Image (cartoon, helix red, strand yellow):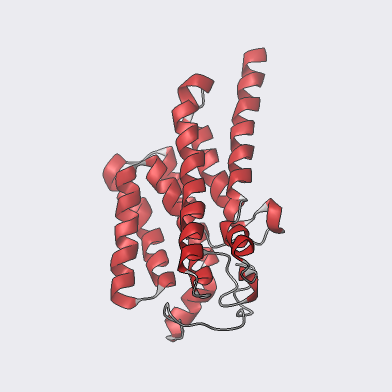
């Protein structure tokens, strides 16, 4: 009984830590470090690398991208590596997987106003299986090269990621977690999807000065 309670507490601790790591919004942190405006206040209003790039500070955007992707990778990679030592089951890994992603889109440190989670999702997938992450990244790059629309690239990558996992590893608990993450990504891009269907979605390189009301907080 004591061992079961200890294992449960350890599992909860891993999941909570993953959420807190995910809550580190690098778009906001890096913007403050570079003396840039709050990423919620311009462009799409989304605290992510693409929006930070609209300031023209490529270094800030790159650090944001690496930070948001890196935190997703770190949380899941650490849980996988430490699983034997702490007797973590696949359900705990799946919990960590979703917790770090939810931390990014609902960060406790920044009033639960997070990003859409594309970079963090990529980091998570790379930790689960490098080939899976690379397949999703390749999909994003190909679509972006063709259309120069970041949101479209993310949407297509989100739809195909569970299919890649099924093809590579077959049905498993983590596949279900990837499906949940993909659904959340699509939901976070709902305004983008509406604009894509209306032919109104902007391409990377545009610099809208004010955050679109429909995207604020997404």
Identify the residue at horizontal 52%, vertical 58% (top origin): 184
| Vertical order, 116 against 132 (above or below) | below
| Vertical order, 35 against 194 (above or below) | above
Q: Specify whether 63 is left or right of 168.
A: right
Residue 146, given in percent of the width and then of the height, sits at 28, 75
Residue 6, given in percent of the width and then of the height, sits at 65, 20
The C terminus is located in which quarter? bottom right
Identify the residue at horizontal 54%, vertical 50% (top origin): 101
The front one of 185 and 148 is 148
Res. 76 in view: yes
| Vertical order, 165 against 43 (above or below) | above
Q: Quadrant of residue 104?
A: bottom right
| Vertical order, 190 against 205 (above or below) | above
Identify the residue at horizontal 34%, vertical 56% (top origin): 136
Q: Specify whether 40 is left or right of 162.
A: right
The N terminus is located in which quarter? top right
Residue 57, given in percent of the width and then of the height, sits at 50, 70
The front one of 209 and 91 is 209
The front one of 91 and 66 is 66
The front one of 68 and 11 is 68
Q: Quick one: which residue is furthest to the front in this view?
A: 34
Q: Specify whether 75 is left or right of 160.
A: right
Q: Quadrant of residue 151?
A: bottom left
Residue 171, given in percent of the width and then of the height, sits at 35, 41
Query: So how many labels did they put on this image?
Result: 0
Q: Quadrant of residue 143?
A: bottom left
Res. 1 in view: no
């Amino acid at each position: 009984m004591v061992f079961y309670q200890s294992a449960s507490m350890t599992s909860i601790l891993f999941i909570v830590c993953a959420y807190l790591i995910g809550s580190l919004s690098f778009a906001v942190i890096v913007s403050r470090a570079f003396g840039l405006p709050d990423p919620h206040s311009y462009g799409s209003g989304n605290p992510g690398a693409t929006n930070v790039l609209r300031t023209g500070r490529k270094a800030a955007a790159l650090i944001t991208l690496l930070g948001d992707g890196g935190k997703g990778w770190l949380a899941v990679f650490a849980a996988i590596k430490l699983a034997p030592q702490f007797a973590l089951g696949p359900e705990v890994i799946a919990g960590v997987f979703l917790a770090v992603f939810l931390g990014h889109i609902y960060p406790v440190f920044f009033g639960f106003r997070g990003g859409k989670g594309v970079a963090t999702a990529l980091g998570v997938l790379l930790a689960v299986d490098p080939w899976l992450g690379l397949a999703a990244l390749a999909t994003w790059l190909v679509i972006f090269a063709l259309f120069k629309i970041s949101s479209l690239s993310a949407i297509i990558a989100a739809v195909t990621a569970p299919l890649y996992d099924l093809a590579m590893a077959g049905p498993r608990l983590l596949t279900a977690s990837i499906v949940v993450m993909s659904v959340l990504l699509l939901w976070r891009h709902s305004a983008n999807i509406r604009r894509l269907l209306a032919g109104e979605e902007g391409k990377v390189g545009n610099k809208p000065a004010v955050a679109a009301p429909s995207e604020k907080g997404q």
